[in-house]
Amino acid sequence: MSFFKRLWGYIKTLFRTTAERAMDPEIEIEQAIQEARSQDQKLRNQAAKIIAHRTQIEAKIERSADEVGEAREMAKQALMRAEEAKAAGDTEGMEKWTRAAQSLAMKLQAAENNLTGLKEQYEIAVTQAESAKKAVEQNAMRLQELAAKRMELVGRLEQAKMQEAVNKAVESIGASMEVEAPSLDKVQEKIDSRLANAQARAELREATPEGAETELREAISVAQADAKLEELKAELGL
């Protein structure tokens, strides 16, 4: 079982390595940029929701504070009415306004509790909003760094392509010279063969009567030419 597991791991590694070699570096760079931009947009959307939540809590705090103020004022009014009824000896009115004051006090307590809870939520929301904005800023810087790195990598990739083209041209020239060299050697062999053959024929000719006769004629011609030159020099007074 372990053998097949190792074999499967080897196959996966081989496939991944082959796929990575086959991928175009320029396409990989563009994919990295697109993924980073997509992540940046998602992060901005999430941050916007967090900041909007903080703003909504701010509005709720304002409304809750108004409710607390209104409930407090009405409870005070109810207490004053109850006291006025008590001073006037109006027992029924005193009980009525006292019950109203109690109801308003309960409402005030609920409003204050709600306001306290909203303020606690607001503190958390503020912290979350600041963290979200900081994350967006950091990711924006990372995206800029990635864009700068992309320019650098694209430049290096172009340099690599140019060097590869030069290397290919140099290799092509070397291959051409290697192909042509044997043909020049053959030409030289042919020339050396013809020269050796001619020299051999000359040696054979000199060794025959015909060759001796030819050599003698050449010597006579040279002697006659020298005599003619002396005659011309005498005429010229040289």
Image: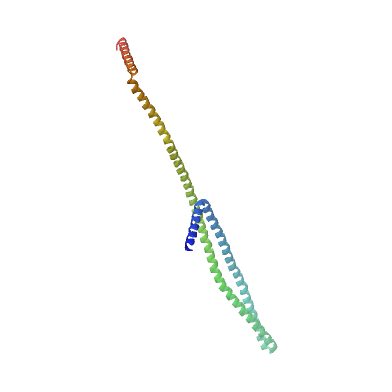
Asked whether the viewer can see residue 140, the reply is yes
Report the side of 46 relative to 220 (left or right): right
Asked if 79 appears above or below 136 in the picture, the reply is below
Q: Nearer the viewer, residue 147 or 184?
A: 184
Q: Nearer the viewer, residue 42 or 123?
A: 42
Residue 46: x and y in percent read: 57, 64
Asked if 51 appears above or below 90 in the picture, the reply is above
Residue 25: x and y in percent read: 50, 51
Residue drawn at the location 50% of the way across and 50% of the way down: 154
Q: Quadrant of residue 109?
A: bottom right
Residue drawn at the location 66% of the way across and 85% of the way down: 99
Placement of the C terminus among the 4 image quadrants: top left
Farthest residue in the top direction?
A: 235
Residue drawn at the location 54% of the way across and 64% of the way down: 133
Report the side of 82 relative to 161 (left or right): right
Residue drawn at the location 58% of the way across and 62% of the way down: 45
Q: Nearer the viewer, residue 209 or 88?
A: 209
Report the side of 186 relative to 125 (left or right): left
Report the side of 46 relative to 82 (left or right): left
Asked whether the viewer can see residue 90, the reply is no
Asked if 9 appears above or below 233 in the picture, the reply is below
